[in-house]
Amino acid sequence: MKTIEDGQLILIIWRGRRYLKRIALDQSFHGKGGMLRYSELIGKPYGIRISDYDIFEPTIEDIVMYGLKRETQIVFPKESFYIAFRLSLKKGSRVLEVGTGSGANTYILSHAVGPEGCVVSFEQEERHFRNAKRNIDRFGEWQNVELHNEEFTGYQGQEFDAAFIDVREPWIVLEKVRDAVKPSAPIGMILPTANQVSDVLKALEEGGYGDTEVLEILIRKYKTVAERVRPNDRMIAHTGYLVFTRKLDILENES
């Protein structure tokens, strides 16, 4: 049984409010439910209630939503987990990311490829790069992320199994990304506006890509009261358009 130890992360839930904290023996959590001494948690299992606080082991989603410091709009877990699925990432995969941002999606990609894989991510803005590096250094489990504080102008090295683009004008780097991935490799993008999607589709139609799809992901949560199950008053709706395509080489007809 895994127990809570000094230096580990915990998720504290009080009346629906969530707090991600790192255990330190000489510190305490002060909330509306009262004071919680971290020393009282050492050696106890996760999944316990003390006073009015529920203590859980954080999930990947918890770390992204409540742990990472944001300098930019992040790729939310409802998209990032699906992105990893659509890019067919698995243990040992190599994935290229153009636009690190705050590192939230980078963190998800890192988990998807595992310690045997590699995430190579480019971020042009120094402020965003520094924040992303702090996030990855603080919460990353493996040394499988390679961050570059520079504009992506191409990659000289082993081809990638997949790529993801999160920049304002992805059509500018699209061909360079295409050159960096293996034949048939999936390429994903996220865009906030329909106008940007239209511009990307125009670039894709110029050739070299196939199996293109545009979609968005909406989540509706429900109240968890047995006597009155119904949708919550608010839902997580549009946070971005996802575009997926694949590298395609057109062969000349030899007949």
Image: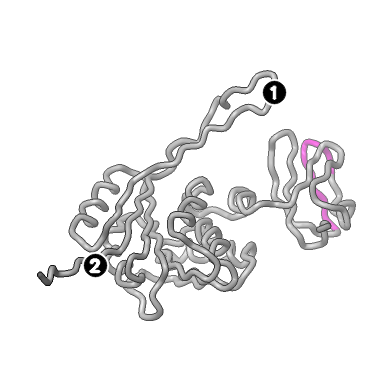
Mark number, residue 127: none
Residue at the image position 41 percent from the left and 61 percent from the top = 99
The image quadrant that residue 168 belongs to is bottom left
**Amino acid at circle 2:** Asp
Residue 249 badge:
2
Residue that numbered label 1 is attached to: 226
Identify which residue, 129 or 178, lies in the foreground: 178
- Residue at x 27%, y 44% (from the top left corner): 195
Quadrant that contains the N terminus: bottom right
**Residue density around tag 1, few if under 14, some if 14–19, many if 20 or more, within 10 Å:** few
Magenta includes 29? yes
- Is 11 displayed left or right of 196 in the figure? right
* Coordinates of residue 25 in the picture (x, y in percent): 85, 59
Q: Quadrant of the C terminus?
A: bottom left
Residue 33 shown left or right of residue 146 in the figure:
right
When the figure is inspected, residue 7 is found, relative to residue 212, above or below; the finding is: below
The span shown in magenta is 26-35
Residue located at (44% from left, 41% from top): 217
Q: Is residue 150 visible?
A: yes
Disc 1 to disc 2: CB gap under 8 Å: no
Residue at (49% x, 69% y) in the render: 93
Instruction: Characterize the magenta stretch by its predominant secondary structure.
Output: strand
Depicted 104 relative to depicted 227: above or below: below
- In this view, the residue in front, 247 or 48, is 247
| Residue 9 in the image, given as x and y percentages of width and height | 73, 56
In depth, the one of 245 and 164 nearer the eye is 245
Q: What is the secondary structure assignment of the residue under circle 1?
A: helix
Question: In the rendered structure, which amino acid carries the disc numbered 1?
Answer: Ala
Residue at the extreme front of the image, as rendered: 255
Query: In the structure shown, which secondary structural element does the residue marked by tag 2 occupy?
Result: loop
